[in-house]
Image (cartoon, grey):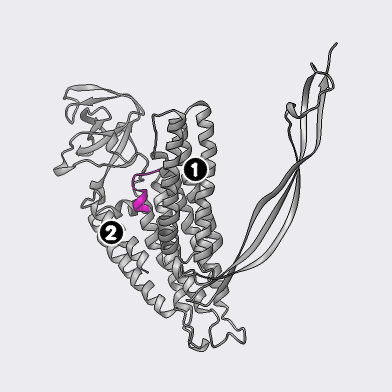
Amino acid sequence: MKQYLIIYLTLVLCLWGCDRHDSADDSYVKEVTPTTIVNLRTGPGQGHGIVRGLHPGEKLVVVGSDGEEWVEVTTSGGEKGYVASKYLEETGYKESGQNLSSGVYHGVDETAYTPHLRYKDGSLMSDYVRFVFTDSGFIFILILFAIQYGVCFWLKKRYNFRQYMPMYERKSAGWGIFAVIVSAAFTIFQIISIFSVRDGASSNDFIFSLMILSSGLIMATVPWRLRISGYRNIHCMSSGAEDSRADWGGTLGTWMWTILIIPLAVFYIQSFRYIRISFDDDSFFGMVWTMAMFLLFTWVFCKYFWTYVVVKYMFKSMNSVLLGIVNCIMGWGIAILGYDMCGSSFNGIFYIISLWLLVLILMIDLGSVLTTVNEKRCGNCHTFEGKYTGTTDLGSSYKTEYDWKNGSDSMINRRHENSVISENRRLVRTTKRVDKWKTHHHCPNCYNDWDIDNSSETTVASNTVERRWKETYIE
């Protein structure tokens, strides 16, 4: 619950610090375009001077109106004037990012816009997203998520796993299922609303992610609580009895987390379109230093932040299969970042070498995450309290491999001193010892035990058993 309180408080701070307005109409400006060639005039009426002609498709921003016949607009070049409203067609809404004090517009700066948010007038979903960024919307989110956090805290107490609770004393799952349905409905509404106005990556994606995680608090955690409340405990361990909610609770949680993962993965992957890392030292030592620093940064991120913060707290209620998918998505983001860095920093052979090093870095990063999760995370209660309890040696075995490799001309006894050697190949036999062992781990929270199989290969012998070549001699 602490991790979701952090998410909730972060969302509140982000909404508090973002550009909010007293009403949704002041937060966003209307975009229009002429339907035909029309004049931009200095005032509302044909008696005023002409600034210039406007062409169909040209983007204009409505900043005011003078009755129903004339509207005040600003062009993308900063020109201000009035246009007859009957010759304009509405194209949507954009986030203003400008000071619209007392109806006076203080210029247009295209870089101040959030270019990938498209709002539709009169749409319930568009109006909701616009409403969130208003003062009233901030209060609404504050109250709504506070209530949801309180409900989730109550359900945590209601469906908590207790080793010494008899099964007949466990609470009914009805209230939990009802809360999950309501939470899922509202979360799906938020997801559809966000993507109905979002066209590509948005500068507000971080806030959108927090909104989805906050609204999905109940749907992500309660099914897991229902699942662990149906576990066997000391009262039914000998008989093997178990509440059926241990099965359907896990299935329900899987579906709920799947709904949350899809939009969050989209936000995460598309965010790397706006992150660029580039270095000017296009040399071998520069490439090695750059990739070494990239390995250090990503390894620390994966080993400590991702594993011990995100996985341990944020994804505590997620099952192992979905967690594996999320880890792959995380690695995908690192791969995109590293690929762009290599492409913008190196050329030629250094670029190819850097890509091979990037693959090696990804294997190291994902390997560190997988190893830590397998050793520390209990597959039953999902806590990070796994303890190493011992090792069982499973013995060793040997395997032999054969491989054709290129041979050296100096190792061939030529029949003619001036002959030409070609297709020189040698068959190499390699003998490897495979050591296998199993480590044992125990969870003190739910008394679950699990084993991890390990193995390593060591080359003990390698020799050439056959040589083949073609010798050509011309008199």
Is residue 110 shown above or below 317?
A: above
**The residue tagged with tag 1: helix, strand or loop?**
helix
Q: Which mark is residue 473?
A: none
Question: How many angstroms separate mark 2 from mark 1 (CA)?
Answer: 32 Å
**Magenta stretch mostly in which secondary structure?**
loop
Q: How many marks?
A: 2
Mark 1 residue type: Ala
Identify the residue at horizontal 46%, vertical 58% (top origin). 260
Q: Nearer the viewer, residue 356 or 391?
A: 391
Q: For the residue marked with disc 2, what is the amino acid?
A: Val
Residue ranking furthest to the left: 102
Point out the tag, 2 or 1, that comes first from the N-terminus: 2
Report helix, strand or loop for mark 2.
helix
Q: Are marks 2 and 1 in contact (CB under 8 Å)?
A: no
* Of 281 and 7, the residue lying toward us: 281
- Residue 312 placed where, x, y %? 44, 63
Between circles 2 and 1, the one closer to the viewer is: 1
Residue 26, can we see it? yes
- Disc sitting over residue 12 in the figure: 2
- From the top left corner, tell me how far across and down residue 467 is, in percent: 80, 34
Expressed as whole percent of the image width and height from the top left, the position of residue 361 reads 50, 44
Magenta span has 390? no
Q: Is residue 126 left or right of residue 461?
A: left
Q: Residue at x 42, y 62 (%)?
A: 314
Query: Magenta region: which residues?
Result: 199-208
- Residue shown at 42% from the left, 37% from the top: 290
